[in-house]
Image (spheres, helix red, strand yellow):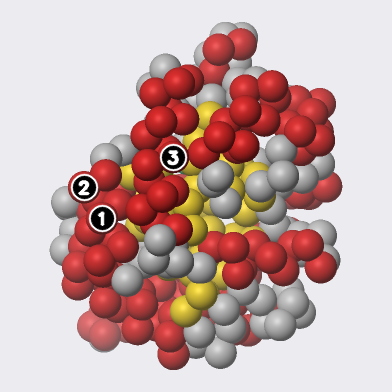
């Protein structure tokens, strides 16, 4: 069934676990993700990153995502990840998405609050949830020593109160994409943010973290974990092997992508404690 972000994250109030948000690129991804959630009897969030909205046929994919969510036996939230403009947020809402992220993390603090609040007002008026971001979750080479990149707990408190976001993405030392060097997470900071903020907390840049890191993040208050890179890495690794051993490549190749995504998602969801929830 199609639900919004608050609905899926609400389950984490009953049992402590992390809801998985997986970005995809095609129908095969979304089928694999929902297969995984149904097999584990758990809610899931399927998403698309804003940077792919113009590269792929967004409205076509949105129809697919929403169709699959409605048909599913588990609660599925359909989410737009990292939107930087109101334009794509409106497009997503019009297409029937139930959740949008406005990423104003590169804006000055006050400006981020103002823009995020605008998005919250529009989205909430039609029952769509909103995720905001404070602090910078970088990409690849991230400056771990720069305190400006980390979410400041006192700012998080003000941001959450003034914007009314449903969920907040925090920067505690993770990066998007593939890590260069060992990730080092600031759990004390996460605990402090958790103490001050009522809304749900989101971990971005989850791909590449150890199982223990994920578990500790959830223990310290993360409710939603974003994954994309680990899905693509699994496909990059497993698909070429499969192609070498298969004569009748079509349609098997599409089924294989669906299967690889399903297996990788199951692995992650189990680590997040996301099973036997429904
Ligand atoms: Zn992200």
Q: What x and y, as percent, mark residue 118?
A: 37, 42
**Mark 1 near mark 2, Cβ–Cβ under 8 Å?**
yes
Q: Which residue is mark 3?
A: 117
Report the Cα–Cα distance between label 1 and label 2.
Answer: 5 Å
Q: What x and y, as percent, mark residue 261?
A: 47, 68
Report the Cα–Cα distance between label 3 and label 2.
Answer: 15 Å
Quarter placement of the C terminus: bottom right
Disc on the earlier residue, 3 or 2 = 2
Find numbered disc 2 in the image and state the secondary structure of the residue it sits on: helix
Q: Which residue is mark 2?
A: 87
Q: Is residue 87 above or below residue 142?
A: below
* Relative horizontal placement of residue 89, taking residue 273 as reference (left or right): left
Q: How many marks?
A: 3
Q: Which mark is residue 90?
A: 1
Q: Which mark is residue 139?
A: none
**Mark 3 near mark 1, Cβ–Cβ under 8 Å?**
no
Q: Is ligand 1 less than 8 Å from the beta carbon at label 1?
A: no
């Amino acid at each position: 069934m199609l639900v919004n972000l608050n609905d899926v994250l609400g389950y984490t109030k009953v049992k402590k676990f992390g809801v998985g948000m997986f970005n995809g690129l095609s129908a095969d991804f979304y089928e694999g993700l929902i297969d995984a959630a149904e097999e584990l009897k758990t809610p899931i969030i399927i998403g698309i990153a804003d940077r792919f909205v113009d590269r792929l046929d967004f409205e076509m994919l949105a129809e697919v995502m929403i169709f699959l969510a409605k048909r599913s036996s588990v609660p599925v939230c359909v989410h737009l990840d990292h939107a930087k403009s109101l334009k794509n947020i409106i497009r997503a809402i019009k297409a029937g998405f139930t959740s949008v992220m406005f990423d104003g993390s590169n804006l000055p603090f006050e400006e981020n609050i103002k823009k995020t609040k605008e998005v919250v007002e529009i989205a909430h008026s039609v029952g769509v949830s909103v995720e905001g971001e404070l602090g910078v979750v970088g990409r690849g080479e991230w400056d771990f020593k720069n305190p400006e990149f980390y979410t400041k707990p006192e700012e998080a408190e003000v941001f959450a109160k003034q914007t009314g976001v449903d969920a907040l993405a925090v920067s505690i030392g993770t990066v998007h994409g593939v890590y260069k060097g060992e990730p080092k997470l600031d759990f004390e900071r996460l605990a402090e943010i958790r103490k001050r903020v009522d809304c749900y907390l989101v971990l971005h840049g989850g791909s590449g973290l150890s199982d223990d890191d994920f578990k500790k993040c959830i223990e310290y208050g993360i409710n939603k974990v974003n994954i994309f890179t680990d899905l693509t890495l699994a496909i990059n690794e497993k698909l070429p092997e499969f192609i070498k051993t298969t004569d009748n490549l079509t349609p098997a190749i599409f089924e294989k992508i669906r299967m690889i995504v399903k297996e990788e998602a199951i692995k992650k969801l189990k680590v997040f404690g996301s099973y036997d929830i429904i």
